[in-house]
Each structure stands twice: as structure tokens, then as C-alpha cells.
């Protein structure tokens, strides 16, 4: 079986319903082997502008369609995604590296956004506000923002796409997507399935190629009314500045530095289970991955022991092997960063409990470092790799202070069995999302997003669609 023989596979960009090849191409690699698995068009500003124009044209009819018709087309897309779940997972693993079971889980998660926003499409209702005078009526309508640009990262090649495209389409917008250069194939396959589902041409465009040129065209264009971006804080800040001249609406889901607090009254076994899920999913390459474990002195050793025992059962290997639970990191730059963070933590007195080195190629061994000082790089910067650093604390106020001592504010995790503490600490943490005795926080039904340098806006939930809607108010007089 080769990728090219999988039915949803596409290696061309999609602009206004046409599948485009480029004169130049960009290689797509399998991070598990380094092999080139595909080449996609290396497009630029000109093609981005064409896609914006196509989106602008297509959006006129789309916004006028009854909500139930938009919903039905999204439901059809959802059904096709599920129908091709295995093929999509194979494409995803080939370009991103995560174990096949995780990839299949991501496809189901990606599909859940399409279903959710298909349902939400029919609940975009307005308001009637009691008017100041008896001969007036105040009506509030919700309208699509218009043409939306979406820029997505490589760590969730499917879910980050549907989480933006589905609410945009449900709201009556048209989208131009620029997927990550590392993982364009999943995005293109999803767009192919949207086309097959009957979503009209020009509503979901995918432009692969030069990030700066394509992003620049998006940001310059007054037609693009909104940008939804998931990626690094540095690029998010740059796009924020570029959005100023045209005052675009922005949803930014940026970096994190998630703390995982284990109090002395926690269920240590449950905390260790949560730690495996919260730290090692996608080999530690998720924006809500635990970056720092803050563990009370009294339970530090027990937690380290419980976590180490579970880490022994992780299996490093290619995502295509059914036993693998830790795939490769995305590229050499990611490996170098992880190596630097480990070396720094150990140099500052951290105790290496397990791992600490490269297994082979881009595969990093799951690593546990105890007694990490709070000023280590690993405690301050996003590691994005399979390394757990444990920092001690001795009282609640100290734990909260350390947890909040970061520019980031995406996700935080708290393990305690004291209900007062659970509420107190959840209230005091400056984060957009809290996992309370729970590490699996991502779901289409909840508002996902962060504060501070982790961004703004929310994705998923009934709030997610509001990001793609404008309010218009009509004052009716003389009644
Ligand atoms: P990472 O370092 O994890 O790849 P990035 O923030 O660089 O994170 O990438 C996230 C997404 O942003 C990718 O699709 C990437 O191509 C895109 N991107 C990177 N630089 C720019 C830019 N200057 N303008 C627009 N998009 C960009």
C-alpha cells in the first residue's frame, strides 16, 4: 500500500474548486524514516490572492443559503471523514509521525468538530432587546464575518483544520487554509472530502507553499476579515501586528507552558495516569502538553516512582507499528531543543531518573528528571518533547505562584482530593483551561483557548462559532 493509492489522498492545492499543481514543489517527509513521501505545490502570494478572490465570490451565495442546507453539507462532510478514517489516519501518521491509534483518534476528534458545528449552524439566532421608546424595536442579527484565513500547525494536521474550517463554513464564511508545510496531505485530503460532500467550490481553499508570502497576502487583503491561527507565539505576535492596518478579527492559539500540580492529598496513581496522557501524547508535541510538574514534597518520591513505572511501558517506534506509543519528533530542530532542555535541567542539578537521550534518528527516549530547579529552561520554555521535569513545592500558595510565573496561560492541570483546594486553586490559576483530576481536556463541546501570551479567542463549543459572526443591530422606529 502506498499513500498515493489511498482514496482521499491529494497532492495538489485547491483554489476555487480547481486542483492546482505548482511549477515548484515542496517535499513532504515521513519523520520516522526521513523519506520523501510526497511533493506539494510551492505557491505564493499570487495564488493566495486568487484563492481570496474565489472565496469572496463563493461566500456571497453561501451566506444566503438556509442554515439547514449549510448544516446538511457539513453533516455529509462529517460522514465522509469517518468513512475514510483509516486512510486519513495512515496519511496523517505518514507525514506527522504519531502512532496510528493516536492518528485515528485525531481523525475522530477532527470529525467531531465538523459534526458539532453542523449542529451549531442551525442555532445562530439573534436577539430582540426591549427598546427605549414604545414605537421602536431593537433587533440583533448575526452575520458571517466574511472571508476567513486559517493557518495551522503540524502537530494536529486534521483537528486544527476542522476546528477552524467547520465553524467558518457553518457561520456562512468562506475559508482559505494554509496548512503547515510539514503536514499538508491531511489538510488536502480533508478538503477533497469536503468537495466530495458537495460543499460548493471556493468555500474551502487550500494554498500550500511559502508561509511568509501566503500569510502576507492574507494579512494585506482587506477582503480577509478574519484570521484564525494556531502556532508559535512569535509568529502569532507578528500576525497580530500585520492585522492592524486592516483591523482583522483574530483568533490566536499560541504556545503554552502547562503546569501539572500534584498536591499531597492527590490520588497519586490517578495523577501518574494523567501525567502519561498529559505529557506523552504525540511524543509531548501538543500545545496543552504538560511542560512542568509541580509536586508537593511529601508525595514527590511516590509520584516519581509511579510515573517512572508507567513510562517503562511506553514503546518508542514508528507510528506504523501497532505497539508504538512514542513516535518520532517532527524534525531535527525539535530534537535539538529537547536535548538542550534536558542538558540544562541536569546541569542545574536535576536528577535523571530515566531516559535522557536520543533513541535513534528523530526518536527521543521518554525522559524523567526529578528535582528540577524552577529556573531551568524546561520550566520556563515550551519543550515540545517527551520529557517530564519534576519541581518540588511545599505549600499551596507557592505552587500557585510558580504555576502562574510564566508569560503563557493555555492549560493547567491540578490533582487534589480536597474540594475546597480544587476550587481555590482552579480559581487562582491564570489559564484558559484547567484539567481538575483530568488530563484529557480537549473536546469539541468545550471552549478551547488561552490567555496572556497563549493567545485569544476560543475554539469549539457554542462559543467557537461566535468567532466567525458579527453582530448587526437594527433600530426600528416609527412603529
Ligand atoms: P512551528 O515552529 O511549530 O512550526 P510556527 O508558528 O512557525 O510553529 O508555524 C505554525 C504555522 O504558521 C505553519 O503553518 C507555518 O507555516 C505558519 N507560519 C510560519 N511563519 C509564518 C509567517 N511569517 N506568516 C504566516 N504564517 C507563518
Image (cartoon, rainbow, N blue to C red):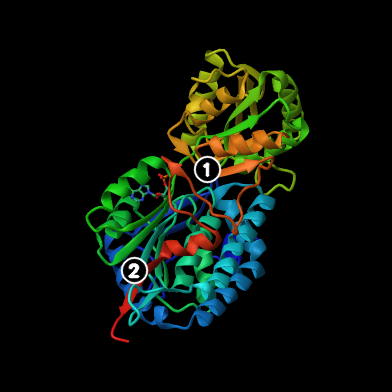
Q: Circle 1 is placed at which residue position? A: 287
Q: Which picture quadrant has residue 473?
A: bottom left
Q: Nearer the viewer, residue 156 or 63?
A: 63
Q: How crowded is mark 2: few (under 14 residues within 10 Å), some or many (20 or more)?
A: many
Q: Which residue lies furthest to the front in this view?
A: 134
Q: Residues within 10 Å of mark 1 (few under 14, many from 20)?
A: many
The quadrant in which residue 73 appears is bottom right
**Residue that carries the numbered disc 2 in the rendered image:** 51
| SS state under label 1 | loop
Q: In this view, does 191 lie to the left or right of 47?
A: right
Which quarter shows the C terminus? bottom left
Residue in view at x 61 percent, y 63 percent:
112
For residue 202, above or below residue 213: below
The percent coordinates of residue 420 (x first, y second) are: 67, 35
Mark closest to the chain's N terminus, 1 or 2: 2
- On the image, the x and y values in percent for residue 337 come to 48, 30
Asked if labels 2 and 1 touch by Cβ distance under 8 angstroms, the answer is: no
Horizontal side of residue 137 vs 420, given as left or right = left
- In this view of the protein, which residue sits in the foreground, 147 or 50? 147
Amino acid at each position: 500500500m502506498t499513500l498515493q493509492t489511498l482514496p482521499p489522498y491529494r497532492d495538489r492545492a485547491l483554489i476555487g474548486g480547481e486542483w492546482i499543481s505548482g511549477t515548484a514543489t515542496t517535499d513532504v517527509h515521513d519523520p520516522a524514516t526521513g523519506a520523501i513521501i510526497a511533493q506539494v505545490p510551492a505557491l505564493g502570494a499570487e495564488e493566495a490572492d486568487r484563492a481570496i478572490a474565489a472565496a469572496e465570490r463563493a461566500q456571497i451565495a453561501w451566506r444566503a443559503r438556509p442554515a439547514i442546507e449549510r448544516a446538511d453539507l457539513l453533516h455529509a462532510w462529517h460522514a465522509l471523514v469517518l468513512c475514510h478514517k483509516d486512510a486519513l489516519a495512515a496519511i496523517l501518521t505518514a507525514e506527522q509521525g504519531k502512532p496510528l491509534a493516536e492518528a485515528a483518534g485525531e481523525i475522530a476528534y477532527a470529525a467531531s468538530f465538523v459534526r458539532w458545528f453542523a449542529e451549531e449552524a442551525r442555532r445562530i439566532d439573534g436577539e430582540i432587546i426591549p427598546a427605549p421608546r414604545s414605537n421602536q424595536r431593537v433587533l440583533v442579527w448575526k452575520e458571517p464575518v466574511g472571508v476567513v484565513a486559517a493557518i495551522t500547525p503540524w502537530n494536529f494536521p486534521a483537528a486544527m483544520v476542522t476546528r477552524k474550517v467547520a465553524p467558518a463554513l457553518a457561520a456562512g464564511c468562506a475559508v482559505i487554509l494554509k496548512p503547515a508545510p510539514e503536514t499538508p496531505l491531511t489538510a488536502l485530503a480533508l478538503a477533497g472530502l469536503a468537495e466530495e460532500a458537495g460543499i460548493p467550490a471556493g468555500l474551502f481553499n487550500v494554498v500550500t507553499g511559502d508561509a511568509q508570502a501566503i500569510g502576507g497576502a492574507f494579512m494585506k487583503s482587506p477582503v480577509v476579515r478574519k484570521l484564525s491561527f494556531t502556532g508559535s507565539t512569535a509568529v502569532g505576535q507578528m500576525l497580530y501586528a500585520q492585522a492592524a492596518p486592516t483591523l482583522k478579527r483574530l483568533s490566536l492559539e499560541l504556545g503554552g507552558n502547562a503546569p501539572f500540580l500534584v498536591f499531597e492529598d492527590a490520588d497519586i496513581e490517578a495523577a501518574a495516569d494523567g501525567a502519561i496522557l498529559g505529557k506523552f501524547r504525540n511524543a509531548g508535541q501538543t500545545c496543552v502538553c504538560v511542560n512542568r510538574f509541580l509536586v508537593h514534597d511529601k508525595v514527590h518520591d511516590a509520584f516519581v516512582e509511579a510515573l517512572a513505572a508507567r513510562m517503562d511501558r511506553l514503546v518508542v517506534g514508528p507510528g506504523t507499528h501497532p505497539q508504538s506509543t512514542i513516535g518520532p519528533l517532527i524534525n531535527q530542530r525539535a530534537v535539538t531543543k529537547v536535548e538542550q532542555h534536558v542538558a540544562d535541567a541536569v546541569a542545574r542539578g536535576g536528577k535523571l531518573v530515566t531516559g535522557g537521550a536520543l533513541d535513534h534518528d528523530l526518536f527521543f527516549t521518554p525522559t524523567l528528571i526529578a528535582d528540577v530547579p524552577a529556573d531551568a529552561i524546561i520550566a520556563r520554555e515550551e519543550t515540545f518533547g517527551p520529557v517530564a521535569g519534576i519541581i518540588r513545592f511545599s505549600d499551596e500558595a507557592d505552587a500557585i505562584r510558580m504555576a502562574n510565573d510564566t508569560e503563557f496561560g493555555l492549560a493547567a492541570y491540578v490533582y487534589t482530593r480536597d474540594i475546597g483546594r480544587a476550587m481555590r486553586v482552579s480559581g487562582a490559576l491564570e489559564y484558559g483551561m484547567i484539567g481538575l483530576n483530568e488530563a484529557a481536556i480537549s473536546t469539541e463541546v468545550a471552549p478551547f483557548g488561552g490567555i496572556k501570551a497563549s493567545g485569544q479567542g476560543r475554539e469549539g463549543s457554542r462559543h467557537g462559532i461566535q468567532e466567525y459572526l458579527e453582530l448587526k443591530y437594527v433600530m426600528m422606529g416609527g412603529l
